[in-house]
Image (tube, helix red, strand yellow):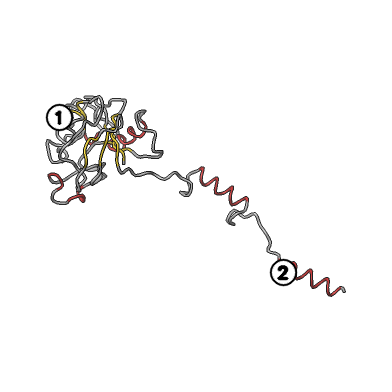
């Protein structure tokens, strides 16, 4: 009888899997708590809202005007992302500044990108074969070609229209103006100059090179 009870006890101990509250064991309380902490501190991508990518993309102009010192290209992008006119939907949408220099953001290095195509882009804000609309009323601004640029503009990028918009673009061809980009958008003095679009209905042509202490809105483009 004693032998039988001992055998049953040994068999029970052998067959029962011990459970530990280990953070690395899926399904345990510690595991779930650990995943929550990682999520809240941004250390895991599994719970982050995915960044949407637009197929019909939007333009808007900032509610604030800035001189040529925009904190560089990245600073201008940040201003787009924090502006009060940035559309709230879709959640997580990224907007970048319609602005070029000679290093950090380039549309084309040859006229209309005809030599290297899209390989000439550096962090360029327009996509190939994509329709762009203005945020205010969804009116079409333009549709890009296979090279991620447009050579005609059917609608104004803003309503009401805005003028004297720093872009850094040359007179034609989507080229950066040599030296006329307010020292890569870090200079707000009256010594340097920056290329502008004359108004929001003619974004791809230059309207001159005013001094960098001139103030204007930033045009922002959904990515």
Residue at image mark 2: 14
Identify the residue at horizontal 28%, vertical 31% (top origin): 70
Q: Residues within 10 Å of mark 2 (few under 14, many from 20)?
A: few
Image location (x, y in percent) of residue 15? 71, 68
> Which quarter of the rendered picture does the N terminus lie within?
bottom right
Q: Which mark is residue 163?
A: none
Position of 24 with respect to 146 (left or right) is right
In this rendering, the answer to whether 131 lies above or below 84 is below
Q: What is the distance, in whole Å, between disc 1 and disc 2 at their CAs? A: 83 Å
In this rendering, the answer to whether 12 lies above or below 72 is below
Image location (x, y in percent) of residue 97? 28, 36
Residue at image mark 1: 209
Q: Nearer the viewer, residue 133 or 116?
A: 133
Image location (x, y in percent) of residue 205? 14, 34
> Which quarter of the rendered picture does the C terminus lie within?
top left
Nearest to the eye among marks 1 and 2: give it: 2
Q: Nearer the viewer, residue 191 or 106?
A: 106
Q: Nearer the viewer, residue 159 or 178?
A: 159
Q: Residues within 10 Å of mark 1 (few under 14, many from 20)?
A: many
Q: How many marks?
A: 2
Secondary structure of the residue carrying numbered label 1: loop
Image location (x, y in percent) of residue 95? 32, 37
């Amino acid at each position: 009888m004693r032998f039988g009870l001992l055998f049953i006890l040994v068999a029970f101990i052998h067959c029962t899997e011990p459970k530990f509250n280990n953070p690395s064991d899926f399904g345990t309380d510690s595991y779930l708590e650990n995943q929550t902490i990682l999520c809240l501190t941004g250390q895991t991508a599994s719970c982050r809202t995915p960044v949407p990518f637009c197929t019909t993309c939007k333009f808007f102009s900032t509610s604030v005007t800035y001189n040529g010192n925009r904190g560089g290209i990245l600073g201008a992008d940040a201003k787009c992302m924090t502006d009060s006119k940035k559309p709230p939907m879709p959640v997580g949408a990224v907007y970048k500044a319609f602005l070029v220099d000679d290093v950090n953001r380039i549309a084309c290095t040859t006229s209309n990108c005809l030599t290297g195509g899209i390989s000439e882009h550096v962090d360029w804000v327009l996509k190939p074969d994509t329709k762009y609309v203005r945020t205010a009323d969804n009116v079409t601004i333009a549709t890009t070609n296979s090279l991620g640029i447009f050579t005609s503009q059917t609608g104004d990028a803003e309503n009401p229209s805005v003028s004297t918009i720093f872009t850094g673009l040359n007179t034609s061809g989507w080229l950066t103006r040599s030296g006329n980009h307010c020292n890569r958008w870090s200079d707000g003095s009256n010594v340097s100059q920056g290329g502008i679009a004359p108004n929001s209905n003619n974004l791809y042509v230059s309207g001159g090179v005013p001094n960098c202490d001139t103030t204007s809105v930033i045009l922002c483009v959904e990515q």
